[in-house]
Image (cartoon, rainbow, N blue to C red):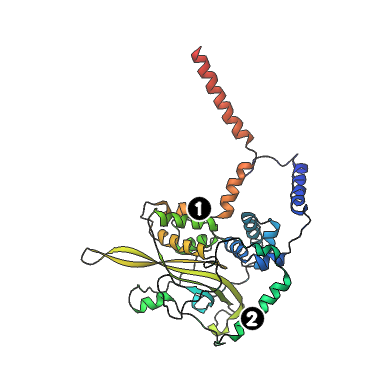
Amino acid sequence: MGYVAVKGGTAAIEASIKRLKYERLKDEEIIEVNTILSTMRTMVDQVMSESSLYSPFLAALAIKQAEGSMEEAVFLMRAHRSTLPRLYYSQIVESESMLVERRISASFKDIPGGQLLGATYDYTHRLLDFHLTEENAEENEQWLRDYKNELQTVEGSEDVQYFPKVVDYLREEGLFETYELDNTLPKDITKESLQFPASRSERLQVLTRGQTGAVTSLGYASLRGYGQVHPTVGEVRVGAIPIYVEHPNELETDEEDHFYIGDIKATEVESFVPVSMKNDKGGEELEFEIGYGVCYGQNETKAIAMSTLDQCLEHPESDFPTHDEEFVLLHIDSVESTGFISHLKLPHYVTFQSKLDSIRQVKKGVQKDAN
């Protein structure tokens, strides 16, 4: 959009950019990118998720450049992402192959493979820890040594352990419907504009890229009363998922010939949503549908909210706004929403003066009629 010519404003813009740098440097403190990378993992994860670019280092760099502004950091990451060549497409990822760090279920106390609490703030007291103001490297190194020694004394197998899906256990009992695999290639919303009605693959892409607060807010709205969708979390799992690509010069290769290029840390959620269905006799009976959520890094709240909205958007017949895919999908993108709100700061001289002239003309006409 063009609102005002840049001509004549170059000097002012350059001065503004210098002032911005001054505000960042004036206290003469420097935060290293590696410091952000090592100490602000949840912020790094959030920026990667919303920018759909998995690079912890670049996310930390964007956070430093943006001075901690999440929307600005995401904007920087997406802009950089648009310059990158797309060399390969990875093979389909099966989350059963995740190297799990954390795995819990709110639906069952005992699940196949057991619950694994992992690292989480869920069980901590929400009290400010003033000891962090006196933190020093020597004490941290000693704590790490003690913790690693403690881990070595814990008995356990060194073999890689994979955890089964909770929903598969229920499907074996016939409690959840089994569907045939849909191998339809997903549409890439970063290469094709979003069209409505959207496919589920498109909806999931928008949701996983969505601004964390917006996705959480709409998920909460659905829980609170707009549709009254109240899922039970069947499983939350956090861990590393291996990524493979095919040989670039061979059209058909066996799975064992695929190349391992690394792994990504991700959060995956499957929620069980109770729904009333008509049976053969015309009566109603309770069944469960699955809502799905996934995002880069560890961001469980967003993934759970995403799974709620996923199930909502599978039922567009509802009148509630959280079931309207245009309402949800067009208003959760951090770059789109921040950009459009921020554009209100740009000059609107012509349009506003035109409105003022219209009001003045109306008032003059009213005064003439009164006289």
In the rendered image, the vertical position of residue 291 relative to residue 353, given as above or below? below
Q: Mark 1 points at which residue?
A: 330
- Packing grade of label 2 (10 A; few <14, some 14-19, many >=20) is few
Hey, what amino acid is under mark 1? Leu
Q: Which residue is drawn at 52% across and 79% down?
A: 97
Residues 130 and 111: in front is 130
Residues 180 and 301: in front is 301
Q: Name the residue under label 2.
A: 148
Dot in front, 1 or 2: 2
> Does any portion of residue 63 appear in the rendered image?
yes
N-terminal label among 1 and 2? 2
In the rendered image, the vertical position of residue 368 relative to residue 201, given as above or below? above
The quadrant where residue 264 appears: bottom right
Counting from the top left corner in percent of width and height, residue 72 is at 64, 54
Give the mark count.
2
The quadrant where residue 360 appears: top right
Counting from the top left corner in percent of width and height, residue 356 is at 58, 28
Q: In this view, does 42 lie to the left or right of 293?
A: right
The quadrant where residue 139 appears: bottom right
Q: Given contact means CB atoms under 8 Å apart, are the residues at marks 1 and 2 in contact?
A: no
Residue closest to the far top: 371
Counting from the top left corner in percent of width and height, residue 124 is at 54, 66
**What quarter of the picture does the N terminus occupy?**
top right
Residues 196 and 344: in front is 344
- Packing grade of label 1 (10 A; few <14, some 14-19, many >=20) is few
Q: Residue at x 73, y 61 (%)?
A: 31
Q: Which residue is drawn at 55% across and 61% down?
A: 209
